[in-house]
Amino acid sequence: MNIIKKAEPHYLHEVAITAIVVKDNRYLITRRAATKKKFPGRWTVPGGRLEVSDYQNLPKDTEYHWYNVVGKTLRREVKEEVNIEIKNVNYLTSITMLVGDYPTLILSYMADYKSGDIVLQKEELDEYKWVTLGEAKQHDLIEGIYDELVMAENKRRGIKTEWTRTT
């Protein structure tokens, strides 16, 4: 049985995935290269886009489905952007935005640092820092990122919260 059909245009979204990486009670923030179209020179967290190639050439986990694709993709993107391995990937929140008529869904996760030394993907990023929550506030973060860091801090303390504007 073939269940694949062409999606209707109003259902198509770009899917991006981000990781709030925690190491020694600090969060990894990265500065987007000045050449980037979206948010040049602003601070954010590592991540990237989900691509069909992230799963289509892999064996399916069931007859029709691939599981854990987002976590695998996030690990790949973090490795590409900052050269580190992450573990314990957990969902945090979701964001949507329109750039013109182009819809984007961003899935935000938090993860623990596992291993590796930071090496930036130069065409994407030009600086990084490990910061406390208070130090993060001193950087020109893309809107909403600080609020996600607050959510991550609460989650680490066992406090369940939904995203809300804190600044």
Image (cartoon, rainbow, N blue to C red):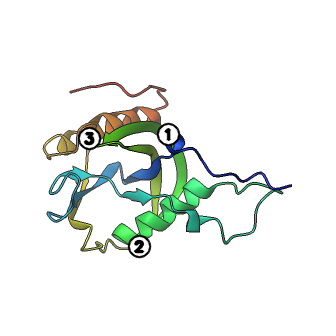
Above or below, 161 against 42 in this view is above
Q: Amino acid at mark 1?
A: His
The residue carrying pointer 3 sits among few (fewer than 14), some (14 to 19) or many (20 or more) residues within 10 Å by Cα, namely some
Q: Is residue 152 visible?
A: no
The quadrant the C terminus occupies is top left
Q: Could you tell me which secondary element the residue under label 3 belongs to?
A: helix
Q: Is residue 15 visible?
A: yes
* Nearest to N terminus: mark 1 or mark 2: 1
| Residue mark closest to the camera, 1 vs 3 | 1
Q: Seen in the image, is 150 located left or right of residue 14?
A: left
Q: Amino acid at mark 3?
A: Leu
* Nearest to N terminus: mark 2 or mark 3: 2
Q: Amino acid at mark 2?
A: Gly
**Disc assigned to residue 133:** 3
Q: CA distance from mark 1 to mark 2?
A: 41 Å
* Nearest to N terminus: mark 1 or mark 3: 1
**Disc assigned to residue 134:** none
On the image, the x and y values in percent for residue 126 come to 19, 67
* Disc 1 target residue: 10
Q: CA distance from mark 1 to mark 3?
A: 38 Å
The quadrant the N terminus occupies is bottom right
